[in-house]
Amino acid sequence: MQRAVGLEEDPSRVSLPEQAQAGDPPHLHSPSMPASHSPMARPATYTGEAEGCSGFLLQCSLYFEMQVHAFPTDRTKIAYLISLLSGPALQWAQSIWEANGPLTRSWEAFATHFKEVFGLNTSALSIHDQLYCLRQGKLTVSEYALHFRTLAANCGWNETALITCFRQGLNPTIRHQVAVYDDVIGLENFIQRTIRISQRLTACALDQPAAHPLPPTPSINLPAPEPMQIDSYHLTAVERQRRIHNGLCLYCGSEGHLILQCPVRPPRPAVSTIQIPPMISPLSRTPVMIVTRSHSVLAYALIDTGSSGNFISHELLKKLSLPRRRIMKTLEIHTILGKPLGRGQVCHQSPIVSLRIGCLHQEEISFLVLEGSTADIILGRPWMSEHSPQVNWTTGEIMQWGESCSLSCLLPVIKICRQKPSPDDSHSSSHLHLNSTSIESPESSHPTEIPLEYRAFQEVFSKQQATQLPPHRPWDCAIDLLPGATPPKGRIYPLSIPEQKAMDEYIKEALQQRFIRPSTSPAASSFFFVGKKDGGLRPCIDYRELNEQTVKFRYPLPLVPTALEQLRGAKIFTKLDLRSAYNLIRIRRGDEWKTAFITPSGHYEYLVMPYGLSNSPSVFQAFMNEVFREFLHQFVIVYIDDILIFSKSLTEHHHHVCQVLQRLRDHQLFLKLEKCEFHRTTVHFLGYVISPQGIQMDQRKVDTIMNWSQPTTVKDLQRFLGFANFYRRFIHQYSIISSPLTSLLKDRPKSLSWNPAATQAFQQLKNAFCSAPILVHPNPDLPFVVEVDASSTGVGAILSQQQGKPPVLHPCAFYSKKLSLAERNYDIGNRELLAIKMAFEEWRHWLEGAHHQVEVITDHRNLKYLQEAKCLNPRQARWALFFTRFNF
């Protein structure tokens, strides 16, 4: 025990590095005390992850309990726990240990502080919220029960409340089967019964023989049910509206009373509802508009599956200046925890008012008046059973309405959704939107509508969900630095008043969305703004210094011309554009500090992948290729954040689009609806205009080339050639035509020496863009024709096919190349032969192994000579070997 005592009296005798390397407590092998052998495994090493904090402390506590004699003091427990730390957690512990304060002598104080530093900040309220919103979804009942038990262990609810909550979270098929049993059993027995029912349903589904369609059954007109039968069927939407309009009872159809006062309606138990505390996130509330004859008030409705009625707060009723009518029987109202809700009783009912949710859904409804409620409106099970809304319980969004709503509640789209919204309607959407991180110009007053057949994927187009912090994935953006790299040191740029306002807004939004956080990093890149085409401001981070020291991720981006060659036979297209694409990828854990940037208002670092990193395009392309791997080269082309879906028929296309949208939903990727185009026969994609007839240049870019003034500087000429070079595959002999212009850039001149030949080439290139043809999609089932030509400065070639009815020769692609000095010394025959070789190399993926013999059109007979000559020079021998791969 001497060593333990020494540790207690002189902490400097055992250093932290020694403790970190020790596998056992420092006194376990003391001569005066034999080592105890516990059947428990040692706790695993802990690095500081919030999710594992509670489990790590539990493992340590159990380990200490099993080896009481090995840990006689609090200080030995603390020392042993520190020996299990690494990474950030060890760095924190080192500062605590070296300070030698009270935390190093009290295990309870140390454990409490440890939990505050590394643990999740989960309060009882958030546990209740998580439990209340928990849904089975795609989980098995066993997996769902495991999540439920974990949350229920610390919520404090009684078993009745827990059983109700567990049942509400089950999928409808299982929930309906469980509802058959009405006996009173405990929570654990209820869960076990549910698991057994689920397993039996799964077994029955596997054994179920293939179903054969039944012959159609003729419809039979049944007599209207008697009033006492009403409870056994649902009113049609038309009948319900008729009764509301005429002031009739919704139960028996008689005059003089409402449904709650109906004398023939069977008695029902007291209404119960779950009242969510006022601190709950506003994301669970849906904005609604209450419309009366004299008022139109914006309110927030709580959609509550546990509520047996629809309620309106007394305060909102007074705000609307509406009278209230007393009901015949006072109702007792309590929460799922058994506590009175509001004042605990409901004695009044509101008159019928118009309730509007979003710009489409409007209904006539009456509420029970609830005094002391913190929610404006509570829409319970009666409302949900009537409208059958599909609700995203995480965000509070109503994704889709039931079929009955299309008859009476949903207003015409053209009449409502395309009119300019009034200021009062600014919050009346059934979706909850947060501003995106980027500084965007105001959206158009004519929003794009999601096609009806894709309304089931409405959350994929949610702007709000795109502004939430994405999860970590295997494709997180890693920033690996070169050996000897130093953190970038930027400077603060002065900002104008509009820029300062935009920066403050950007920082505020990004912090709220948790895209960035305050930083203490040694790195500091500069922050500034650049103008956008629409007049807005785009935030930019100057990562040039960081990029120079970053290990490059060499994942290839698709070759656009090659990718577009997949479109042969496609007749219908859909183009999708991801919202905040790069922000959908997280920075790898531990690399966040490298993205730090400085502004006049502070020092911050990114948690998501920002624009400007050299590896961002490659990282995102690798992620997208993995997401759509089995769709690529089949019916999807992906270039970073642009997605093109192509199909041969409308039916096939609908199936393809649904597959892509489902894949986006599975991976929590979101689309910018206003930039998406559905079911088009012509679409602009990556600078090209794509149609069933082929590919052509974007006329807007052609107009830019045609209006380009004559270059006066080297930079001007480089910009023009760079812009024109994008469309070189549309221009026959592009390299030969542009040769006088490219010659002006030889040897990197400091000034531009313009000459008449350059003027002629500049104008000739413009004329060539005006007359450029549409390039047809190559069809491997048809013969190819290769036509080549060579001059003293370059070579050119055309790949063509006979397509259409009647068949006409159409160009598929053009190729040209400027000759090197050595190649210019070839005689005309060898230059022509070189042109054929270069063309075959360029289009090898089409010509090698072609179904039909390739026809070559040339001014000379060099190919025939190459095939028949008995003596070839070394260069010709190499070319002859190359040509043996082709059938021409």
Image: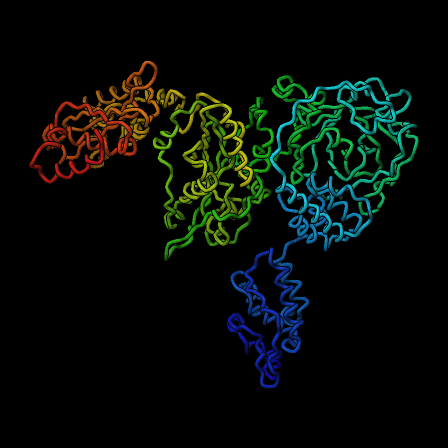
Q: Is residue 704 above or below residue 368?
A: above
Which residue corresponds to the image point at 37% horizontal and 32% vertical from the top-left? 563
> Which of these two is toward me, 731 or 603?
731
> Which of these two is toward me, 722 or 669?
669
**Residue 376 visible here:** no
**Residue 776 visible here:** yes
| Residue 426 % position (x, y) | 65, 27
Which residue corresponds to the image point at 64% horizontal and 66% vertical from the top-left? 110
Q: Is residue 44 above or below residue 612?
A: below
The single residue placed furthest to the left in the displayed view is 871
Colour pattern? rainbow
Q: Quadrant of the C terminus?
A: top left
> Which of these two is toward me, 62 or 760?
62
The single residue placed furthest to the top in the displayed view is 806
| Residue 443 % position (x, y) | 56, 27
Q: Quadrant of residue 570?
A: top left
Q: Is residue 664 left or right of residue 883?
A: right
Which residue corresponds to the image point at 83% horizontal and 25% vertical from the top-left? 321
Q: Is residue 836 above or below residue 182?
A: above
Q: Is residue 569 above or below residue 438?
A: above
Q: Is residue 419 left or right of residue 487?
A: right
Which residue corresponds to the image point at 63% horizontal and 62% vertical from the top-left? 114
Q: Is residue 151 left or right of residue 313?
A: left
Q: Quadrant of residue 446?
A: top right
| Residue 280 % position (x, y) | 71, 43
| Residue 97 % position (x, y) | 58, 69
> Which of these two is toward me, 792 or 876?
876
